[in-house]
Amino acid sequence: MRLLLVEDHERFADFVKTGLEQEGFTVDAVTTAANADAAFAAVAYDTVVLDLGLPDADGLTLLKAWRDQGSSIPVLILTARDGVDDRVKGLNAGGDDYLLKPFEMQELVARIRALLRRPGGTLGTVIEVGNIAFDTSAREVRIDDRAITISRREMGVLEHLMRRAGRVVPKDVIEDKIYGFDEEVSSNSVEVHVSRLRKRLATAKASCLVHTIRGVGYLLAVEEENESTESV
Amino acid sequence: MDNTSIPGWRIKSKDPLIALSEYRGMLDDLTRLISDWVWETDPEFRLTYVSEKIFQSLGITVDEALGKKITQFGVFRSSVGETINPDFTRPFRSLSFEGENRDGAVRHILISGVPVYDSLTGDFSGIRGISRDVTSDKAHREASEKLGYAMENYPGFFFLTDSNERFVAVNRTFRDLNHISMSDAVIGSTFEEHVRRIVNLGLVPDAEGKEEEWITYRLYLHRNPHGTFEIRRQDGQILQITEMRLDDGSTATFSTDITELKHVEDALRQSAERNRIFAMNVGHDLRMPLAVLSANIDNLEDKKTAASLRRDLDAMARSVEQLLDATKWEKPEIRHSDRVDLSKVAHDVVSELALNAIRSGRHLELRGADKPVWVSGLEEPMAIAFRNLVENAIEYVPRDTDVIVEVDKSGAVLVADMGPGIPENVREGLLNPQIRFDRRGPNSGLGLSIVQRIAEAHGTHLSIEDKEGGGTICRLEFALLK
């Protein structure tokens, strides 16, 4: 898996490169938009991790140039919180994603993997979160490598939660994804599917929990090994 | 012609005695009715007759006055204030007399009189005349003279124009500032002539290149006086101008030199701006090392230490972001056209913080955000405000309790928790933007002061209430758009 890291801060780039290499990625790190463009033209990367604030150009300008050339390579944008304007928010819909600095290495890796598993991505069709593996082409769910039986609708709920693991998936988004236009949706049917899914995951000893954020939606998170301690 | 009658006076009787008595009656009436007092003296100028009105002026009765000389009650003064002894053998008119009444107060009296000669012998038999007390007239005249003097010497300029916008009065500073000599006929000229003149002289830098526009503006202000405005002069002076319409339709205009004040104000503003930029630079400079640390912590082998370091690092990162938020949104400017959907912002913030809440064992919930609630405001600062309120609540409530974000269709957002509550005496300090850092908790002080500042920019404020049954409700109310 070959990855282009575009980040002008060299020490930071070094740490990120080391972290990604430990996860099995091959990383080319460049510090300017010009070098990034040259590398991009020379090598067929699987994904790009792109910092927005580059010394010679805005990262989004670079991304637009690549898109205009017809490239559909998944790109993960790194930005500070105040760099998140509507253009950056819009990335989510276009096959790209963004991550706020500072971040945890595992979050960066998870986001990159999620991008690579999108339709057209190069990482194959198996999404993994904790000990759950979801084969999106075979439509099979395995927990600790044991296949479990699961209904089509529950599987749809699980897929979307896994694709956005650690982030809230709004309830109406899940509704839209698991029902066709002409299907009747009863008001509590998503709750019913989620509740069944929870039982199934618990029975199979999944290391993930489906959390309800009342009024918003659901969130799949890997259970932390240690009980997180009170902040001081 | 009858020598006992006075032409035009209605004396009917032909009997001289009766006619005399009628004259006497008439004289009595007149002396009673007029405010002046009437008197007559003998050849030694001792009063032989005086009307009762003398009491109202000098405070002495007729009986007390009779037989005394008028100079026993005061002195005659010349127009320049010297004591004089007038020649009473000739008619005199409006001589200034300064008397003292019983209370010791000075009375100003104008005295007119004529010498009287015996009709039979032709000998000088005294004088008679009338006296008018002008004390209050004189005080008024002196007061307005002094007012005029003060206005003339007032350090700012002063001028008065009549209802036809013609100059009625101008003071020295006005002439000096506008290069008008005493001999120039400014009185009677129009205000527009004056404005055109100072623009042509180049005294108004703001008018340069758009002379007519500025003249129109200045004339408009003068025609519609309301309070104060500022004018910069070519010599660097900044004047605050106050114009007011008076009851008689005239307009009074005066200036105060606020150049010093403006310079101090500018210096303060620049200093605040430098501090803001400094804080912003510090924030930006801190971000990168934090990101480096964060990327590196995960490479540590001791996972327990790494987790503990990450918590501190997260707190630091949050403080840095708050610092940057505080500097970026020091004074958010909300325009009329800025509108925000409260439900969307609340939804975004709750989504963003959901994982934090789960990781720290608190239950985050959103209520009332199913329909858009449009209010006047800016999305980014509003999101920062909500995020700070929710982060604070998550930080301070006990584990396994709820933090509820509620959007009210009246245009309010509430963040309710079941925490220990914020003591009354601490609340004000938390909201005070002057108190930047607080030692009570890892992040408390700056967060709520940012919320308060953003709230103020939206024309509202953060209210903190106790929740029934324990806990706290933080409430922000915005202007609902219909």
Image (cartoon, rainbow, N blue to C red):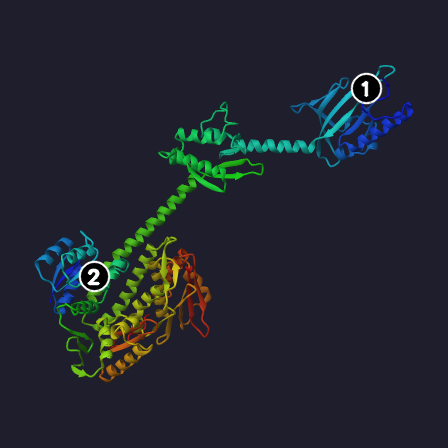
**Quadrant in which residue B121 is drawn:** top right
Percent from the top left, x then y, of residue B109?
Answer: 72, 29
Is A77 situated left or right of B178 in this image?
left
Q: Nearer the viewer, residue B79 or B128?
A: B128
Identify the image quadrant of the C terminus of chain B: bottom left
Percent from the top left, x then y, of residue A152?
Answer: 22, 79
Identify the image quadrant of the N terminus of chain B: top right
Q: Which residue lies at the image location 36% right of the left edge and 67% below the top edge?
A: B390
Q: Secondary structure at mark 1?
A: strand
Percent from the top left, x then y, of residue B375?
Answer: 39, 60
Q: Chain of mark 2?
A: A
Residue A207 shows in the view? no
Is B263 situated left or right of A138 in this image?
right
Give me the disc on residue B116. 1
Q: Are marks 2 and 1 in contact (CB under 8 Å)?
A: no
Give me the disc on residue B83. none
Tell me if residue B23 comes above or below residue A3 in the rendering: above
Is A66 situated left or right of B261 in this image?
left
Question: Which residue is the extreme one toward the top?
Answer: B122
Q: Label 2 amino acid?
A: Ile
Q: Secondary structure at mark 2?
A: strand
Disc 2 designates what residue?
A: A77
Disc 1: CA contacts within 10 A as few (<14), some (14-19) or many (>=20): many
Disc 2: CA contacts within 10 A as few (<14), some (14-19) or many (>=20): many
What is the distance, in whole Å, between disc 2 and disc 1 at their CAs? 117 Å
Disc number lying in front (2 or 1)? 2
Q: Label 1 amino acid?
A: Val
**Quadrant in which residue B329 is drawn:** bottom left
Q: Chain of mark 1?
A: B
